[in-house]
C-alpha cells in the first residue's frame, strides 16, 4: 500500500453514491507535505516523458498541478469551465459530454497558452467517468499539442473512465485506484 | 521596483474598466518560478507572525496560497464560493456584499478546517474593493481564529479596499500596489 492509499484509508470518508470525501487533505484543506509527495511521485513516473507544460482544470486540480509543475521545472496552465468570465482573445473550447453525449460543461484555454510542440502532462484529482479528462485531451488536440500522459490522484476503478482513456492509447497513471467503497461500513479497497 | 512590478510591466495587459490581465503568469498560465518568489516574499514578511494556516478563496488564490503555505510549513484551506456543491457537514458562511451592502456571493469553509487558535494568513491574487477579503475575514472571525495578516499579490491602490482593510486594523501586505492604469496607452504606475 502506498502513502496515498494509506492516507485515504486514514482520512477519506465514504458517502452514499460512491462519493469519497478527501476534503481534509486534498480538495478543501490541503496537506502541503502530502501534495509534495504526490508531486514527487508523478514527476518520477513521467521523468522520461519530456514534459514541457502541465495542464489541469479548475478548481481542485490547480494545487496538485502546480506542485507537479514545480517538480518538473515547467509551467502550468489550467482550463476554465464554462461559467468562467474574464476570458478574452481566441480560446480553445471543448464540450464535456456525459455518457449520452449530452453537453454538461465547457472547458476553455486561451490559445496563447497551449501550442503546437507542447508536450503535456494532464493532472487532475479524480477520474471517474473521464469526461473532464477527455475535454482536456480535446483541448490539447485542438492546439496540436501532444498529451504525453495523464496523472490522476484517485481513480474510481469501478467506473469506466480510466479504461476508456487507456483504450484511446493514452498513458494514464493513477496513484490510487479504488476498487470498491461501502458507505455503510466505510470500507475501501484498492486495485493493485 | 521589485520583481513582481517588473513582471507586471513586462507581461501585464491593461484593459478598459481598470482591468489588469495577468493571465500569462498568475491566473490562467502560472509561472511556477514567479510563484515561488512570491511565496518566499510573503513568507519573509510574515515570518514573525506565527502563522499556523493559510486561508484563501477559490479559484485564483489557490496556487499562490499553496506556495506560501509550503514556504511557511503549514497547511492551506480554501473557501468555496456560493455555487460550490459538495459541501456537507457544518460550515461557516459569510456574505460577500458590494458597496451598497447587496450580497453578491457567499463564501463557505467547513467548520472542521478553521478553528479557535488558528493564526491565519489570508492570501489572494487581487485586492480591489476588498469585499472578498472581508468575506474571508468574517469566516475567520466566526471561527474565532485570528487573522494575523493578509497577503495580496496585486492591490488596486485606486480602489478603496486596501485602505478599508488597513483601517480595520489588519496587517495587509501587497507585493505590488497599482497607482494608475491607462488602457489607451497601456501605462501602469505603482505606488511606492
Image: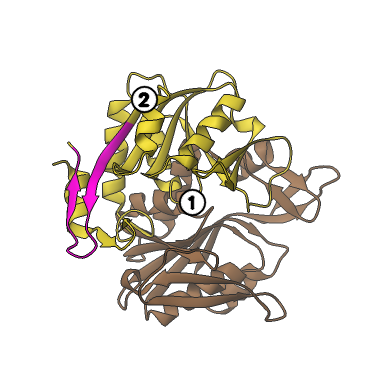
Chain colours: A yellow, B brown
Residues at marks 2 and 1, CA–CA distance in whole angstroms:
23 Å
- What's drawn in magenta, residue-wise? A173-191
Q: Is residue B26 visible?
A: no
Among the two numbered marks 2 and 1 on one chain, the one whose residue lies closer to the N terminus? 1
**What label does residue B144 carry, if any?**
none
> Around disc 1, counting alpha carbons within 10 Å, would you say few (fewer than 14), some (14 to 19), or many (20 or more)?
some
Label 2 marks a residue whose chain is A
Q: Nearer the viewer, mark 2 or mark 1?
A: 2
Label 1 SS: loop
Q: Residue furthest left?
A: A1
Q: Is residue B142 left or right of residue B178?
A: left
Q: Residue at x 32, y 38 (%)?
A: A39
**Residue B103, position in %: x, y?**
64, 77
Label 1 marks a residue whose chain is A
> Around disc 2, counting alpha carbons within 10 Å, would you say few (fewer than 14), some (14 to 19), or many (20 or more)?
some
Residue pointed to by mark 2: A171
Q: Residue at x 56, y 41 (%)?
A: A101
Q: Residue at x 49, y 43 (%)?
A: A99
Label 2 SS: loop
**Residue A26, position in %: x, y?**
33, 53
**Residue A79, position in %: x, y?**
56, 41
**What label does residue A59 carry, if any?**
1
**Above or below, comparing residue B116 to residue A61 in the picture:** below
Disc 2 to disc 1: CB gap under 8 Å: no
**Above or below, comparing residue B116 to residue A98 in the picture:** below
Which image quarter is the C terminus of chain A in?
top left
Amino acid at each position: 500500500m502506498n502513502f496515498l492509499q494509506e492516507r485515504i484509508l486514514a482520512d477519506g470518508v465514504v458517502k452514499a453514491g460512491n462519493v469519497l470525501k478527501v476534503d481534509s487533505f486534498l480538495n478543501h484543506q490541503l496537506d502541503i507535505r502530502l501534495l509534495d509527495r504526490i508531486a514527487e511521485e508523478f514527476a518520477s513516473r513521467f521523468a522520461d516523458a519530456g514534459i514541457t507544460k502541465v495542464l489541469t482544470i479548475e478548481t481542485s486540480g490547480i494545487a496538485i498541478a502546480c506542485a507537479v509543475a514545480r517538480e518538473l521545472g515547467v509551467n502550468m496552465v489550467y482550463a476554465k469551465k464554462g461559467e468562467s468570465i474574464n476570458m478574452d482573445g481566441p480560446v480553445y473550447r471543448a464540450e464535456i459530454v456525459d455518457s449520452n453525449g449530452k453537453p454538461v460543461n465547457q472547458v476553455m484555454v486561451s490559445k496563447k497558452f497551449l501550442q503546437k510542440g507542447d508536450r503535456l502532462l494532464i493532472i487532475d484529482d479524480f477520474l471517474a467517468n473521464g469526461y473532464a479528462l477527455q475535454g482536456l485531451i480535446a483541448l490539447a488536440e485542438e492546439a496540436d499539442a501532444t498529451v504525453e500522459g495523464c496523472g490522476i490522484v484517485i481513480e474510481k476503478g469501478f467506473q469506466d473512465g480510466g479504461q476508456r482513456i487507456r483504450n484511446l492509447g493514452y498513458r494514464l497513471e493513477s496513484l490510487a485506484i479504488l476498487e470498491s467503497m461501502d458507505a455503510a461500513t466505510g470500507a475501501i479497497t484498492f486495485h493493485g
